Image (cartoon, coloured by chain):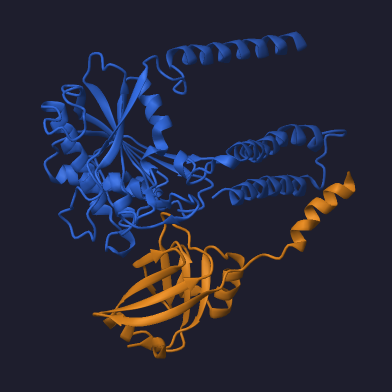
Chain colours: A orange, B blue
């Protein structure tokens, strides 16, 4: 009985947790809006909360969603105010206080909350393809 | 001495038993279905039958269902209107696991009937003499994240449009023949006695609807309102209508339980507002399973079993504290056991971990 229980629980340590790859796949101008697309190899949850894009301390909350991509709609003037080298990250829901989070801490949170927080690298205006 | 103690205990027990049994007799069990048989009917005026006056990026379906006491004896009946929350809107007919967030659905796909997820509740309430309408809002869900208010004004307008339709069918019947109802509902709905329930984004939707109805001069009387696991993106303020907010303890979607603002924001903002407000934290409940269409049926039994165990254990742990403290803390020479506070802390910690583990198993 002890062995059965041991192996039952031990199997959970043997199966590596699958981590979806989530990246910024494109940034482009559409009219007076910049559309920043976040793509994943795992479908994003369709729920009642909102996906929030954080670039530094600035947040963007409006998006279009398809199965494995989210297109954030960033007003052009807001985009022009973003600073180079800021951390880009995305959260499901708006419960994280961006003002207090360091890049390192965001990466840690992303590992702990793979379905609620995604670290997307550093922002650069060079990402923008006209 | 002992006999006196027994007598006092017996008196207290009999008194409390009498009080509780009297109370139980006076208040019918709200969980027991009513005596009326129930009929369900659907209506569907088309996927793009309604265009909002606000700038919402899509036209919307006018679709829903109605549960009512079979034969509609007497009346008019008080009305309940339900509005579902946000979920995928379409599924592929050949592979139902393949879902999409489009509106209208693409060829090969069909609409997910989220509005039918409250049929259990509608049947129950209709058996008690209510007419219960459930409104489909897939067209909003497919496009709301790109609109400035996340589709909340559209939800309010859609609800009011259904009220307008039902008001017409209640006064003159379906003279255009769009539903097949004919005159069967004429005089049967009490449009001055409406309760609304909105789940999740539908929660903010019914608040928006109440505000819109008020802005239009209250053509209908919203008697009461329930927000179930709601969002509150707009921090809407609704005074003057009795309301209850239900916050599921294990909500894995709107996990910050932001709907509590509906209660907090209106509690003291208007000193002349004395309407009743309730806030309920539902232990063991998650976000989605209030809607049966969103509930994965194949694990429902297991979830229910796990839920019972995991929510029951913390209660057992908590109850055990009493004999633990009484029995261990004061045993022997009636001196406190040195490690008792630590043991108490550990048991509370274990209880909380069990509850959180259960919540993680749920969505």
| Residue B260 or residue B33, whichever sits in front | B33
Name the residue at the bottom extreme.
Answer: A126
Q: Residue at x 33, y 50 (%)?
A: B138
Quadrant of the rendering where the N terminus of chain B is positioned = top right
Tell me if B228 is positioned left or right of B193 in this view: right
Q: Is residue B206 above or below residue B236?
A: above
Q: Is residue A111 above or below residue B38?
A: below
Tell me if B176 is positioned left or right of B104 in this view: left
Asked where in the image residue B122 lies, by quadrant, the reply is top left
Q: Residue at x 81, y 36 (%)?
A: B328
| Residue A92 or residue A18, whichever sits in front | A18
Q: Is residue B37 above or below residue A59?
A: above
Residue A35: x and y in percent read 34, 77
Residue B318: x and y in percent read 67, 38
Residue B343: x and y in percent read 77, 46
Q: Let me know if residue B86 appears in the view.
A: no
| Residue B248 or residue A17, whichever sits in front | A17
| Residue B178 or residue B75, whichever sits in front | B178
Residue B108: x and y in percent read 39, 53
């Amino acid at each position: 009985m002890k062995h059965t229980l041991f192996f039952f629980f031990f199997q959970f340590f043997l199966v590596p947790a699958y981590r979806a790859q989530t990246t910024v796949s494109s940034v482009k101008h559409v009219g007076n809006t910049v559309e920043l697309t976040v793509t994943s190899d795992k479908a994003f949850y369709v729920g009642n909360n909102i996906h929030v894009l954080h670039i530094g301390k600035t947040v963007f909350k409006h998006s279009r969603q398809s199965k494995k991509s989210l297109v954030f709609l960033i007003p052009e003037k807001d985009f022009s105010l973003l600073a180079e080298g800021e951390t880009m990250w995305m959260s499901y829901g708006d419960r994280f206080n961006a003002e207090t989070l360091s890049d390192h801490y965001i990466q840690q949170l992303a590992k702990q909350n793979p379905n609620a927080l995604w670290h997307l690298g550093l922002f650069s205006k060079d990402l923008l393809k006209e | 001495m002992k006999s006196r103690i027994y007598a006092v205990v017996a008196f207290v027990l009999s008194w409390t038993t009498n009080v509780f049994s009297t109370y139980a007799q006076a208040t019918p069990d709200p969980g027991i279905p009513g005596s009326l048989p129930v009929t369900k009917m659907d209506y569907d005026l088309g996927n793009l039958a309604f265009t909002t006056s606000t700038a919402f990026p899509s036209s919307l379906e006018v679709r829903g269902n109605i549960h009512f006491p079979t034969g509609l004896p007497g009346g008019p009946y008080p009305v309940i209107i339900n509005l579902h929350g946000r979920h995928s809107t379409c599924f592929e007919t050949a592979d139902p696991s393949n879902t999409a967030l489009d509106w209208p659905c693409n060829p090969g796909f069909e609409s997910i009937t989220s509005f039918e997820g409250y049929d259990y509740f509608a049947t129950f309430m209709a058996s008690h003499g209510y007419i219960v309408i459930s409104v489909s809002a897939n067209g909003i869900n497919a496009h709301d994240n790109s609109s400035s208010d996340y589709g909340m004004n559209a939800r309010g307008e859609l609800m009011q449009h259904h009220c307008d339709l039902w008001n017409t069918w209640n006064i003159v019947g379906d003279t255009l023949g769009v539903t097949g109802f004919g005159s069967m509902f004429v005089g049967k709905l009490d449009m001055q006695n409406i309760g609304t329930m909105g789940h999740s984004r539908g929660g903010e939707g019914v608040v928006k609807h109440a505000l819109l109805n008020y802005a239009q001069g209250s053509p209908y009387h919203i008697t009461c309102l329930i927000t179930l696991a709601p969002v509150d993106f707009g921090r809407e303020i609704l005074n003057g209508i009795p309301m209850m907010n239900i916050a599921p303890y294990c909500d894995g979607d709107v996990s910050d339980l932001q709907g509590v603002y509906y209660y907090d924001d209106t509690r003291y903002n208007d000193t002349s507002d004395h309407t009743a407000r309730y806030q309920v934290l539902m232990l063991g409940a998650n976000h989605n399973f209030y809607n049966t269409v969103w509930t994965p049926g194949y694990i429902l039994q297991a979830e229910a079993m796990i839920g019972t165990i995991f929510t029951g254990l913390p209660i057992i742990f908590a109850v055990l504290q009493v004999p633990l403290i009484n029995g261990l803390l004061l045993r022997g020479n009636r001196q406190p056991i040195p490690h008792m506070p630590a043991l108490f802390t550990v048991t509370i910690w274990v209880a909380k971990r069990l509850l959180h583990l259960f919540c993680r198993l749920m969505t």
